[in-house]
Every structure is written in structure tokens, then in C-alpha cells.
Image (cartoon, rainbow, N blue to C red):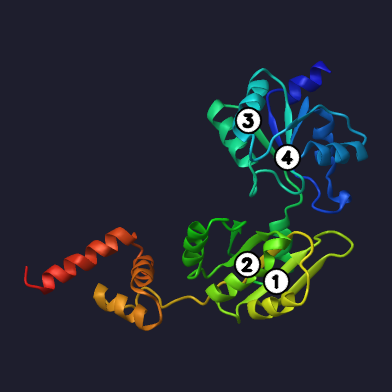
Amino acid sequence: MEEKNKTLGGVLYLVATPIGNLADLSERALKVLSEVDFVAAEDTRNSGLLLSRCGIQKPLVSYFEHNKRERGEHIVGRLLAGESCALVTDAGTPAISDPGEDLVRLCAERGVPVSSIPGPCAAITALTLSALPTRRFTFEGFLPTENKPRRELLDELSHETRTMIFYEAPHRLRATLELFSETFGADRPITLCRELTKLNEEATRTTLGGAVALYSGKEPRGEYVLVIGGGKAKAGADDYPEDPAAHVEALMAGGLDRMEAIKAAAKARGLSKGKFYAMLEAAKTDGNGR
């Protein structure tokens, strides 16, 4: 036991757990779970059942979004005292769209070693099933629930050319698909994944318009991973007008409003929106015979 504590003591282990199929729990994950001093879990009931099925008995500490600040300090205090902890979520890899991100950051600030035990991740599993480009992609997790930040994020992503990955709950799926269709266009390809790694695993490849139509008459069930194809690349850096005002006008002629056009023009030139706006103002002043 002394050797075990010497090996694992004072380390936070991020242990990936199955997203559906219990057989996906790795031998290394089982070893770590059986040897740590305690387990920090998103839901102690779910994780307790998983440990029980694996014949493992460990003290469990709850760690989730609404207690992460207070409980994070508690966990780090125990780690600094020499104990070892395995952090698990209800399913998948801790710290991915998960409050474990905050615990890892806190450990980094306090000098506590962190080790990741790789395994199942719903986002990567869905991406590989999507039949969409996988070389470059962006993971967005769940959309913000409030209207303003959600709208701002979608405005930003409206020019995204990489494959995009989102998580969504069944009760919000229809509204989210309609929002995506309005933002990205009904003909944009999407793969909707659910029940990943389970017996009834499903990957539906269609368009956003097709997905909206499909779920207008079908009840969403289970947690979803939505993989959406990126948009077509805009004109290259050498193709835009040299004059910044003409650049903005050209983008507005293509359907963007003024602020969207300024943001897109700044991005195309590799500038911040503020710097590009200053360039616009300077060009306007020069044109008036400063």
C-alpha cells in the first residue's frame, strides 16, 4: 500500500469513461480507478454504479458545475496533502465541455500534477462517423442558453470553413436545428449522432433543411452530437479591394450588414475589427483632404 501511494499520491487523474458501451473502459482506466484514494464524479450515483459493475469500491466526492468552486478547493487541498484522485464525468472525457476544465486549471496554478487517461469522447466518435472533413474542425460544445451570446457565437461561426461539432439535448434539438438552418443555410450538410457506441447507435447524414423536416415529425430522443460541414472559403487575401471602404461595400453587396462586413473584412486582412475600423476612418479622413 505504501508503494501504491508513493506512485499515485498527489496526482489528479482525468479518467475517460464509456459513453455507452462498458467494454470501452480501458485496462489502464480500471487500474487507476482501483488504486486512487478517492474519485471525484459529476454524479456520484452514476459513477458509483459504474465502479460497482467493475468491482471497485472507492470514496466518492461530487464535483459538478454548481459546486466546482468550493469543491475544487477541497479536492486540491487533498491532492496537496498527498492523496490521489480520479476525476470522472457521467460519460466520456473529463474537462471536455465539462467543469473538469476548471479543476485542471486550479491544479496547474497550485503545482499539482495532472495525468490524462485517454478513452471515449463523444465529439471525436461522432466526427469519425460523420463522413465530413476531419483534418480541420472546431468543437463548440453546447450553444449558450442566453439569446445574445448565442447570437454572437453563431454570427462568428457563420464564416467558419472548418467542420463544426456541437452537443445538444433532445428538448432543444428542433429549435437548434432551425437556428442552424437560418444561420448556415438549409443545404449545409449535417450528421446527427445519437446513442453512440450503444446497440442502437445512429448517424443520420443529411442537410440542415432535411434535419429540420425529419424532426418536425419525429420525437428527438437521447443526447445528440451534431457535426456540421464548414462553409466555402471566401475570397482570398489577394482578391479583396485594396481600399477598405470598397472592401466593406463589396461584402455588403453580398448580403452582409455593415458590422458583419467590417468584421469579415478585418478577418480577411488578418486585422482586429478595431484596427480595421481605424483604417476605414483614416481612409475617410484622407479622402476628405486632411
| Mark 1 → mark 2, Cα distance in angstroms | 14 Å
Label 3 element class? helix
Q: Which mark is residue 86?
A: none
| Mark 4 → mark 1, Cα distance in angstroms | 28 Å
Label 1 element class? strand
Q: In which quarter of the image is residue 29?
A: top right
Quadrant location of the C terminus in the rendered image: bottom left
223 sits to left or right of 79: right
Q: Quadrant of residue 133?
A: bottom right
Can the viewer see residue 253? Answer: yes
| Mark 4 → mark 3, Cα distance in angstroms | 12 Å
Precedes in sequence: disc 4 or disc 3 = 4
Mark in front: 2 vs 3:
2
Q: Which mark is residue 42?
A: 4
Q: Which mark is residue 191?
A: 1
State the residue at coordinates (35%, 83%). Answer: 253
Precedes in sequence: disc 1 or disc 2 = 2
* Circle 3 residue: 72
